[in-house]
Image (cartoon, coloured by chain):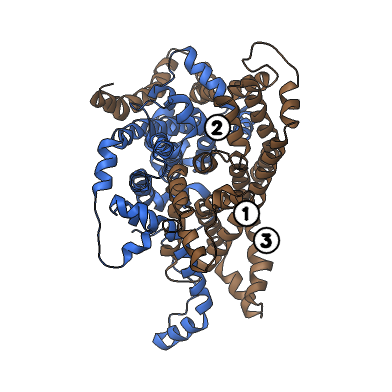
Chain colours: A brown, B blue
Amino acid sequence: MDTLLMAIVVVIGVPAAVCGYIIATEWVLRFAGPNARARIRPWLWVLPAFAFLITFMIYPTIRTLLASFQNARSTEFVGLDNYVQLLNRDTFWQTLLNNALWIVFFTAIVVGMGLIVAVLTDRVRYETVVKTVIFVPMAISFVAAGVIWSFMYNFNADIGTVNAGITAFGAEAVPLLLESPLNTFLLIIVGIWMWVGFAMIILSAGLKGISAELLEAARMDGATELQVFFRIILPLLAPTIAVVATTIVITALKTFDIVYVMTGGRYGTEVIGTLFYNERFTNRNIGTSSAVAIILLLAIIPVMIFNIRRFRAQEAIR
Amino acid sequence: MTTAETAGPRAVPRTGVAAALTSLVDRWPLHLALIVISLIWLLPTAALLISSFRPADQVLTSGWWNALGSPFDFTIQNYQDVLEGNNIGQSFINSLFVSIPATLIPIMIAAFAAFAFSWMEFPGRDWLFILVVGLLVIPLQSTLLPVLQLTTSIGLTGSFLAIWLAHTGFGLPFGIFLLRNFIGSMPREMFESAYIDGASPVTAFFRLVMPLAVPAIASMAIFQFMWVWNDLLVALIILGGTADVAPLPVSIAGLVNSLGQGWHLLTAAAFVSMLLPLVVFFSLQRYFVRGIMGGSVKG
């Protein structure tokens, strides 16, 4: 397509169309009576959102659920065959184990380091410099991060930074990304490098909300820094930590890009996200790939319930 | 670089050089820890940046740290090659065409819905919003294949329109959630007096809500833009791999597969893809925390 034409559509046409919709609703409502107007108006305002949510989230999820009970080409129902077949694969348990490693180590270290950096930077004058440095990887795509870290992990000790470090101590270079389960941990490190900035920014905002006088009073009463942290800061930050932790757990469950770019799920690094992709596009099996997606969804439902409960508790306070 | 926060440090006593020195000596473990963490975090990106400016034969035979000593031998050849020869220039434009509408559309539509959820009465309002909160965690994987079938059946697969619509759908739950928290905390009197003065909801929305919600809109814009710009999965599936529409992540992932060890080009391409998200982040970051925390944190 013509680049200039496309640019005009993108910059002017699209915003004009969206704003035009809402202005048009008010014009249409003029023809309704005052009571009908107040009743219809809210629905017109939420209509585009729900049209998108139904088309791109609710309907597709139901279709995926159905497809997970159908054969490879979605032509007939096969009951639970896809699930049974997946659960009988030895490699599938390896995949689940890898996701469990991601959930435990990725979440714990990202939240832990985010908290440590937030608390430490709060005490120095060059706070913003450190925070900026830690946050930068968050703006980098998983693909670019994959390139950066494949370079770091390169087997050739003349090029790969990590192997250069290992050989500098006289040891043999290690094919880092080929050795399971070491490689999964190395991929988790990439994830940690990218996500600590996110945890840090939000936890730091929560930390700034704790009154300085309260902390000062505790110190005056002879509390040590560790006591201040564990008895005051940590309990007060608990709701913020919950927000961050749920986001990070979901990220861990959905992990795809890092693994896809760095190993493609080979060498024992497969996770649910790459298994889904490989089943669909390498094995061309819609049935099993849908079953994988539904298993992922089932794993996320507890987080969803937790989120809704937390939201309702928060609304009750408002 | 600009600053991430304007709030100053609070535990530092500001009385004279001697006191400052004592505190520096007393607190050396703190400073050491922060400096070490910062260096570790910078190292991978620094390695990438330095490598991308080294001549190809050197990138492939010696480590990036060798470039730090003399002779200083840097070149922009890799960037020229990658922009002209490897479709990265076209991909950069494609990424813009994908990301700008895929950020603008969900912001506007989420703002409409958030305004209705906050300040209009309708039956089932709370339950519909809880549905949105539930949708926040739906994994992309469980929706992508039917979305692909849908776009294919109406002949949109491989077009920009398809990926704008898909990203709008996927970004909306977070957007509605974020903006509703912010718009919902605006003062009721403001709307009442606007309506008494005869303003329509559309006027109130464009004149009051949108300008006041700038912090929340900016943080949503950062998230949505970074997510769309950096997205690989949706682009791979909905746009496919054709060079004329491929955005940066797809092209770079393709380069990874085809070049394998072509590090001099990969490093340059990766750096090109990082530029715009960094610019967006640094220019909007002052709104970031204020927007995302809504009224829940006074910072």
- At numbered mark 2, what does the secondary structure look like: helix, strand or loop? helix
Task: Find the distance from the CA under tag 2 to the CA under tag 1.
Answer: 27 Å
Q: Nearer the viewer, mark 1 or mark 3?
A: 1
Q: Are marks 1 and 3 in contact (CB under 8 Å)?
A: no
Looking at the picture, tell me which residue is in the foreground, B73 or B269.
B73
* Residue identified by numbered label 2: B117
Q: Are marks 2 and 1 in contact (CB under 8 Å)?
A: no
Left or right: B103 as drawn, with respect to A11: right
- The amino acid type of the residue labelled 2 equals Phe
- The amino acid type of the residue labelled 3 equals Pro
Q: Residue drawn 43% across and 54% down? A: A136
Disc on res. A235? 3
- The amino acid type of the residue labelled 1 equals Ile
Q: Are marks 2 and 3 in contact (CB under 8 Å)?
A: no
The answer for which chain carries disc 2 is: B
* Residue identified by numbered label 1: A241
Q: Residue drawn 73% across and 16% down? A: A78
Q: Nearer the viewer, mark 2 or mark 3?
A: 3
Task: Find the distance from the CA under tag 2 to the CA under tag 3.
Answer: 32 Å
Q: Percent from the top left, x then y, of residue A194?
A: 50, 51
Looking at the picture, tell me which residue is in the foreground, A93 or B92.
A93
Count neighbours of disc 3 (C-alpha within 10 A) and say few if under 14, some if 14 to 19, many if 20 or more: few
Query: In this view of the protein, can residue A35 be seen by the observer?
Result: no
